[in-house]
Amino acid sequence: LLVLCAALSASPPEIVAHRGESADAPENTMAAFRLAWERKVPAIELDVHLSKDGKLVVIHDKDTKRTANVKKVIKESTWDELKDIDVGAWKDAKYKGEKLCILEDALATIPKGARCFIEIKVGAEATPALVKAVKGSGKSNAQLCVISFQADAVEASKKALPDIPAYYLASFKQDKETKQWTPTIEEVIATAKEIKADGVDLSYKGPIDEALVKKVRDAGLGLYFWTVDEEGPARQLVELGADGITTNKGEWLGKILSQP
Ligand code: G3P
Ligand code: CA
């Protein structure tokens, strides 16, 4: 009965469009962010790397090889050398001409009441540029959230921007023989507490169950999951009381979860 009550009382999770509405538009581009907003997805996620001249370039990989027809390593290139690179055509010819963008451009698109999850891919080194972009954006603290697999990035963000939530990202690997998951949730929670994170943002492909949720909640942490594009797992996470779910198909997930 307790489980049933918990399931019935679970409030709908925040839906976060992973790299923008990336199933239908090129990931981490202004087109993907605008499509998410047009479709009324409540939040977007994006990734940032530092350019040679200190700009936070919105891109998942450390270079442009996968999403452009040329290979430029972000940290070895100036923004001037990167700004005209086409990162749209690989997805669909209709997106030809879609360029790389910087964090400031992406933040400017966030509508009132919506949120942006900024994933730091380059550790604490990104913090000065992050502070500059966030302070200059005019967005409220409640509209922003910092996430990272790198503990030093989360820790530095909480020191520099204490009022902006920051979540520690984690993924899990399972040993084929012992079935043991690494890291354990206890290890993830311990790191999250040490770096003063407000929550954890976990791969849903892991040891996710009620016991894990209880441990996270007992530690006073928020609980997000990524990257969920299937109905079954999404519904299970809702029943477990997830605060949010990141997906490549934001509009689709919103519709699915609004139905019983
Ligand atoms: O939202 C977290 C998720 O984006 C982490 O994985 O590789 O897509 O950046 P990745
Ligand atoms: Ca990411």
Image (cartoon, rainbow, N blue to C red):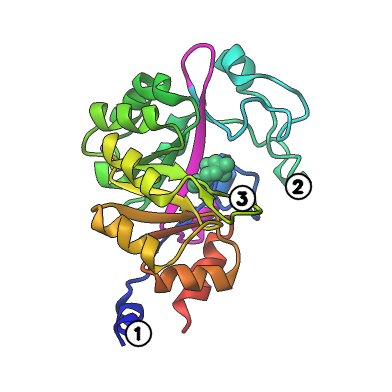
Q: Which residue is mark 1?
A: 4
Q: Is residue 260 magenta?
A: no
Q: Secondary structure at mark 1?
A: helix
Q: Residue at x 52, y 74 (%)?
A: 256
Q: Which residue is mark 3?
A: 175
In the rendered structure, the answer to whether residue 130 lies left or right of residue 96 reads left
Relative to 28, does residue 76 appear above or below in the rendering? above
In the rendered structure, the answer to whether residue 95 lies left or right of residue 206 reads right
> Which mark's residue is nearer the viewer, 3 or 2?
3
Q: Which residue is mark 2?
A: 92
Can you tell me whether the CB of the residue at mark 1 lies under 8 Å from the nearest atom of ligand 1? no
Mark 3 Cα-neighbour bin, 10 Å: few <14, some 14–19, many ≥20: few
Q: Residue furthest front?
A: 178
Q: Residue furthest bottom?
A: 1
Q: Amino acid at mark 1?
A: Leu
Q: Earlier in the sequence, mark 2 or mark 1?
A: 1
Q: Which residues are magenta?
A: 34-55
Q: Nearer the viewer, residue 146 or 232?
A: 232
Query: How far is disc 2 from disc 1 in space, using C-alphas?
Result: 44 Å
Q: Secondary structure at mark 2?
A: loop
Q: Quadrant of the N terminus?
A: bottom left
Q: Amino acid at mark 3?
A: Asp
Query: How far is disc 3 from disc 2 in space, using C-alphas?
Result: 38 Å
In the rendered structure, the answer to whether residue 58 lies left or right of residue 6 reads right
Residue 54: horizontal and vertical position, in percent?
A: 46, 15
Residue 122: horizontal and vertical position, in percent?
A: 48, 25
Relative to 90, does residue 13 appear above or below in the rendering? below
Residue 178: horizontal and vertical position, in percent?
A: 59, 54
